[in-house]
Amino acid sequence: MKPGTYILRAADARARMAAAWHFACSFLEAGQDVRVTVQEHKPSRSLEQNAMFHAICGEIAQQKQWAGRWMDGEGWKRLLVDAWARESNRQQGDIVPTLDGSSIVNLSMQTRRMTVADMADLITYAQWWATDNEVRLRDVAPMRDQRLAEGRAAA
């Protein structure tokens, strides 16, 4: 049996807890022990936040070079996440050799695993960085909405 995660909210906590109990009973009836952990649930970043951050990265990619070359939005995303993590004393990940030993790979933190609060902080950092480095950010809301619609259409 696969483990399950149940997020309790005030509106339906009793029903969800009952469902979790019934799920736990299926393990117990099979003679397996069950571990129950209760912790605060911090929702992960929203699709709107993700789209907004990617739109900002795209704006930077159109206006700035780094290390003497133009990079795409994904490259800027990695640079900004790494800089933000350092600036805010978060663990960025490890740098490891590639499998063939010819280069290195940064196993950096991933935005899909960030909380709503962390993603909001990262977006603010990216906007600050862009402004501080003379990147003119247009109203990225239309670009955010387009990325959001594309993401939903692909799902």
Image (spheres, rainbow, N blue to C red):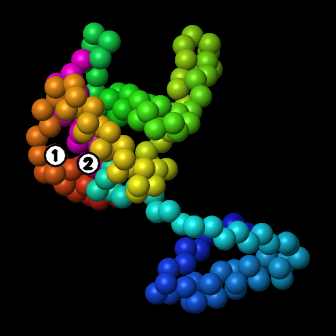
Expressed as whole percent of the image width and height from the top left, the position of residue 29 reads 84, 82
Expressed as whole percent of the image width and height from the top left, the position of residue 38 reads 66, 71
Placement of 125 over or under 48, stated as above or below: above
Expressed as whole percent of the image width and height from the top left, the position of residue 63 reads 16, 25
Residue at the spot 13% in from the left edge and 51% down from the top edge: 142
Residue at the spot 50% in from the left edge and 62% down from the top edge: 42
Based on the picture, tell me whether residue 71 belongs to the magenta stretch.
Answer: no
Mark 2–mark 1 distance (CA, rounded to whole Å): 7 Å
Which image quarter is the N terminus in? bottom right
Nearest the viewer among 33 and 29 is: 33
Q: Secondary structure at mark 2?
A: helix
Say left or right for 139 vs 101. Answer: left
Identify the disc placed on residue 140: 1
Badge 2 crowding class, 10 Å Cα cut-off, few under 14, some 14 to 19, many 20 or more, is many
Which image quarter is the C terminus in? bottom left
Q: Which residues are magenta?
A: 51-65
Badge 1 crowding class, 10 Å Cα cut-off, few under 14, some 14 to 19, many 20 or more, is some
Based on the picture, tell me whether residue 57 belongs to the magenta stretch.
Answer: yes
Q: Which residue is mark 2?
A: 52
